[in-house]
């Protein structure tokens, strides 16, 4: 069965939305993720259902079938491995790789991605801290929390970001916040829930609530 690039993109979007919402995915959510009209989404969902990649009932949401889930998982695996390659081997910054990986993830051939995985040393996480499924579709997860949920005196190591937008990642670079950096929450402002954090035991900065919500840490004791 041939799956087009557009169909792959929809499967990946459905997978990611379901991962966050934990329920059947609504058409409007898919339209927002794909930046397209709901009518276009409906047409695509009918095609995916005909190929038995999703279970789709009008007004009741969408679920991936076993084959749809496998296809989406492989696509995400390729995307994140390519991001690792681009950052670690070609020297791209973490804010530069998403669009490139979007193109490379559609290159077909499981032997290629398996060799890439081996070449990179079987990484478990990509440059943004997202887990990379292995060749069997198994994921590695860790107990991480959002910085916005920390209390004064709590500290942790930055392990991921929930926003991959270039402006956000560039901002983190500017203030010295990246994966592996220690963060100590010094104080929280009650008015707007912004937080004062100490970065790497040195400089202190104020983070807006939005920034704090988009940063993950593994808490250290």
Image: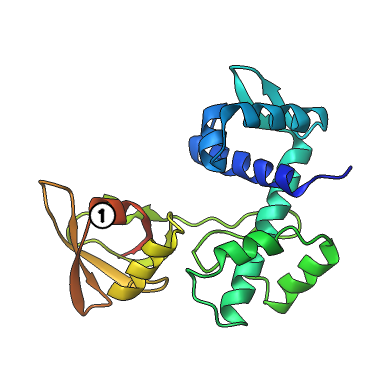
Q: Quadrant of the C terminus?
A: bottom left
Q: Nearer the viewer, residue 96 or 117?
A: 96
Q: Quadrant of the N terminus?
A: top right
Q: Quadrant location of residue 154?
A: bottom left
* Left or right position of 197 against 52: left
Q: Nearer the viewer, residue 119 or 169?
A: 169
Q: Which residue sits furthest right?
A: 1
* Rendering coords of residue 40 (x, y %): 64, 31
* Rendering coords of residue 19 (x, y %): 55, 41
Q: Residue at x 19, y 77 (%)?
A: 203
Q: Residue at x 39, y 72 (%)?
A: 178
* Left or right position of 86 against 195: right
Residue 7 in view: yes
Q: Quadrant location of residue 184?
A: bottom left
Residue at label 1? 150
Q: Residue at x 18, y 54 (%)?
A: 194
**Badge 1 element:** loop
Q: Is residue 51 above or below residue 10?
A: above
* Left or right position of 61 against 66: left
* Rendering coords of residue 96 (x, y %): 52, 70
* Left or right position of 166 against 212: right
Q: Residue at x 80, y 31 (%)?
A: 52
* Rendering coords of residue 55 (x, y %): 71, 26
Q: Is residue 180 above or below residue 213?
A: below
Q: Residues within 10 Å of mark 1 (few under 14, many from 20)?
A: many
Q: Is residue 22 above or below residue 118?
A: above
């Amino acid at each position: 069965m041939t799956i087009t690039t557009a169909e792959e993109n929809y499967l990946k979007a459905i997978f990611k939305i379901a991962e966050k919402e934990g329920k059947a995915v609504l058409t409007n959510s898919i339209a927002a993720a794909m930046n397209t009209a709901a009518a276009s989404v409906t047409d695509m969902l009918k095609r995916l259902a005909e190929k038995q990649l999703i279970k789709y009932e009008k007004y009741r949401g969408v679920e991936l079938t076993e084959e749809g889930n496998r296809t989406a998982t492989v696509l995400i695996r390729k995307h994140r491995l390519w991001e690792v390659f681009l950052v670690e081997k070609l020297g791209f910054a973490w804010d530069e790789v998403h669009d490139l990986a979007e193109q490379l993830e559609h290159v077909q051939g499981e032997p290629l991605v398996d060799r890439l995985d081996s070449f990179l040393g079987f990484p478990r996480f990509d440059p943004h801290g997202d887990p990379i499924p292995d060749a069997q579709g198994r994921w590695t997860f860790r107990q991480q929390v959002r910085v916005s949920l920390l209390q004064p005196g709590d500290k942790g190591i930055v392990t991921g970001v929930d926003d991959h937008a270039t402006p956000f990642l560039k901002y983190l670079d500017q203030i010295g916040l990246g994966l592996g950096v220690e963060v100590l929450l010094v104080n929280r402002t009650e008015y707007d829930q912004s937080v004062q954090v100490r970065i790497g035991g040195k400089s202190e900065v104020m983070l807006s609530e939005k920034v704090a919500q988009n940063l993950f840490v593994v808490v250290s004791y």
